[in-house]
Protein backbone atom coordinates (compact mmCIF):
# COMPACT_ATOMS: atom_id res chain seq x y z
CA UNK A 1 0.00 0.00 0.00
CA UNK A 2 0.94 3.62 -0.42
CA UNK A 3 0.56 6.26 2.25
CA UNK A 4 0.41 9.96 1.50
CA UNK A 5 0.79 12.73 4.07
CA UNK A 6 0.36 16.38 3.19
CA UNK A 7 1.94 19.31 5.00
CA UNK A 8 2.61 22.99 4.51
CA UNK A 9 -0.87 24.42 4.65
CA UNK A 10 -1.76 27.47 6.68
CA UNK A 11 -3.12 30.99 6.68
CA UNK A 12 -1.69 33.46 4.19
CA UNK A 13 -2.69 36.87 2.89
CA UNK A 14 -3.84 37.35 -0.67
CA UNK A 15 -0.85 37.67 -2.97
CA UNK A 16 1.28 35.47 -0.76
CA UNK A 17 2.86 32.09 -1.34
CA UNK A 18 2.82 28.65 0.20
CA UNK A 19 4.50 25.38 -0.65
CA UNK A 20 2.64 22.19 0.04
CA UNK A 21 4.51 18.93 0.46
CA UNK A 22 3.31 15.37 0.09
CA UNK A 23 5.36 12.58 1.65
CA UNK A 24 4.92 9.28 -0.13
CA UNK A 25 5.68 6.12 1.83
CA UNK A 26 4.97 2.44 1.84
CA UNK A 27 5.20 0.54 -1.38
CA UNK A 28 6.39 3.28 -3.71
CA UNK A 29 6.23 3.43 -7.47
CA UNK A 30 8.46 5.71 -9.47
CA UNK A 31 6.10 5.45 -12.42
CA UNK A 32 3.03 6.77 -10.63
CA UNK A 33 1.15 9.92 -11.48
CA UNK A 34 0.74 12.31 -8.58
CA UNK A 35 -1.89 14.96 -8.27
CA UNK A 36 -3.11 17.72 -6.03
CA UNK A 37 -6.84 18.20 -5.56
CA UNK A 38 -8.70 20.72 -3.44
CA UNK A 39 -12.14 20.88 -1.91
CA UNK A 40 -14.25 23.40 -0.07
CA UNK A 41 -17.32 22.50 1.99
CA UNK A 42 -20.36 21.88 -0.17
CA UNK A 43 -18.37 21.67 -3.39
CA UNK A 44 -16.96 18.81 -5.40
CA UNK A 45 -13.30 17.98 -5.19
CA UNK A 46 -11.39 19.89 -7.87
CA UNK A 47 -8.29 18.72 -9.72
CA UNK A 48 -5.55 21.33 -9.31
CA UNK A 49 -2.45 19.81 -10.93
CA UNK A 50 -0.90 16.52 -11.99
CA UNK A 51 2.60 15.29 -12.69
CA UNK A 52 3.45 11.96 -14.27
CA UNK A 53 6.53 9.76 -14.05
CA UNK A 54 8.15 11.78 -16.85
CA UNK A 55 7.41 15.09 -15.07
CA UNK A 56 4.80 16.07 -17.62
CA UNK A 57 2.41 18.42 -15.88
CA UNK A 58 -1.19 19.55 -16.14
CA UNK A 59 -2.83 22.50 -14.40
CA UNK A 60 -6.39 23.60 -13.92
CA UNK A 61 -7.02 26.85 -15.73
CA UNK A 62 -7.76 28.56 -12.41
CA UNK A 63 -4.19 28.01 -11.16
CA UNK A 64 -2.13 27.92 -14.36
CA UNK A 65 0.73 30.37 -14.17
CA UNK A 66 0.49 30.66 -10.37
CA UNK A 67 0.98 27.09 -9.13
CA UNK A 68 3.78 24.65 -9.91
CA UNK A 69 3.76 20.93 -9.19
CA UNK A 70 7.00 19.02 -8.87
CA UNK A 71 8.30 15.70 -7.60
CA UNK A 72 11.48 14.31 -6.11
CA UNK A 73 11.42 10.54 -6.48
CA UNK A 74 14.67 10.10 -4.56
CA UNK A 75 13.03 11.68 -1.54
CA UNK A 76 9.55 10.29 -2.31
CA UNK A 77 8.07 13.76 -2.24
CA UNK A 78 5.58 15.71 -4.31
CA UNK A 79 5.28 19.47 -4.00
CA UNK A 80 2.84 22.19 -4.92
CA UNK A 81 4.32 25.68 -5.00
CA UNK A 82 1.51 28.22 -4.85
CA UNK A 83 2.10 31.89 -5.65
CA UNK A 84 -0.14 34.94 -6.02
CA UNK A 85 -2.70 33.26 -3.84
CA UNK A 86 -6.28 34.44 -3.97
CA UNK A 87 -9.10 34.07 -1.44
CA UNK A 88 -10.79 31.66 -3.86
CA UNK A 89 -7.80 29.33 -3.46
CA UNK A 90 -8.97 28.69 0.10
CA UNK A 91 -9.64 24.96 0.38
CA UNK A 92 -8.41 21.71 1.82
CA UNK A 93 -5.69 20.40 -0.46
CA UNK A 94 -5.22 16.67 -1.02
CA UNK A 95 -2.35 14.73 -2.51
CA UNK A 96 -3.27 11.66 -4.56
CA UNK A 97 -1.46 8.93 -6.48
CA UNK A 98 -2.41 6.83 -9.47
CA UNK A 99 -0.08 3.87 -9.51
CA UNK A 100 -1.60 1.77 -12.28
CA UNK A 101 -3.33 4.13 -14.69
CA UNK A 102 -6.76 3.19 -13.40
CA UNK A 103 -7.36 6.17 -11.16
CA UNK A 104 -6.33 7.91 -7.98
CA UNK A 105 -6.67 5.12 -5.45
CA UNK A 106 -4.36 6.57 -2.82
CA UNK A 107 -5.15 9.78 -0.96
CA UNK A 108 -3.78 11.78 1.89
CA UNK A 109 -5.94 13.38 4.56
CA UNK A 110 -5.37 16.87 3.28
CA UNK A 111 -3.94 20.13 4.52
CA UNK A 112 -5.95 23.34 4.94
CA UNK A 113 -5.01 26.45 3.00
CA UNK A 114 -6.75 29.68 3.93
CA UNK A 115 -6.14 32.88 1.98
CA UNK A 116 -7.35 36.07 3.60
CA UNK A 117 -8.32 39.13 1.59
Image: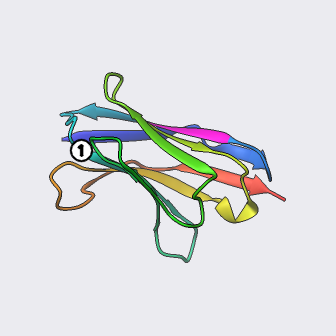
Question: Is residue 78 left or right of 116 when viewed as pictured?
Answer: left
In front of the other: 3 or 95: 95
Residue at x 70%, y 54% (from the top left corner): 114
Magenta-drawn segment: 18-22
Number of numbered tags placed on the structure image: 1
Residue at x 58%, y 37% (from the top left corner): 8
Magenta region's main secondary structure? strand
Which residue matches tag 1? 32
Tell me: residue 12, above or below residue 46: above
In front of the other: 23 or 15: 15
Question: Is residue 60 left or right of 65 when viewed as pictured?
Answer: left
Q: What quarter of the picture does the C terminus occupy?
A: bottom right
Tell me: residue 99, above or below residue 7: below
Tell me: residue 97, above or below residue 3: below
Percent across and percent down for residue 57 are 40, 50
Q: Does the magenta stretch include residue 3?
A: no
Farthest-out residue, top: 74
Q: How crowded is mark 1: few (under 14 residues within 10 Å), some or many (20 or more)?
A: some
Way the structure is coloured: rainbow
Secondary structure under tag 1 reads loop
Question: Is residue 5 left or right of 40 when viewed as pictured?
Answer: left
Percent across and percent down for residue 103 are 23, 61
Residue at x 53%, y 76% (from the top left corner): 43
Q: What quarter of the picture does the N terminus occupy?
A: top left
Percent across and percent down for residue 51 are 37, 47
Percent across and percent down for residue 75 are 36, 23
- Rendering quarter of residue 68: top right
Residue at x 60%, y 38% (from the top left corner): 19
Amino acid sequence: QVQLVESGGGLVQAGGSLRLSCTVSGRTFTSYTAAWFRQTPGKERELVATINWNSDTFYASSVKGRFAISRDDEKNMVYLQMRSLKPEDTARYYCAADTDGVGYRYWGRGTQVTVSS
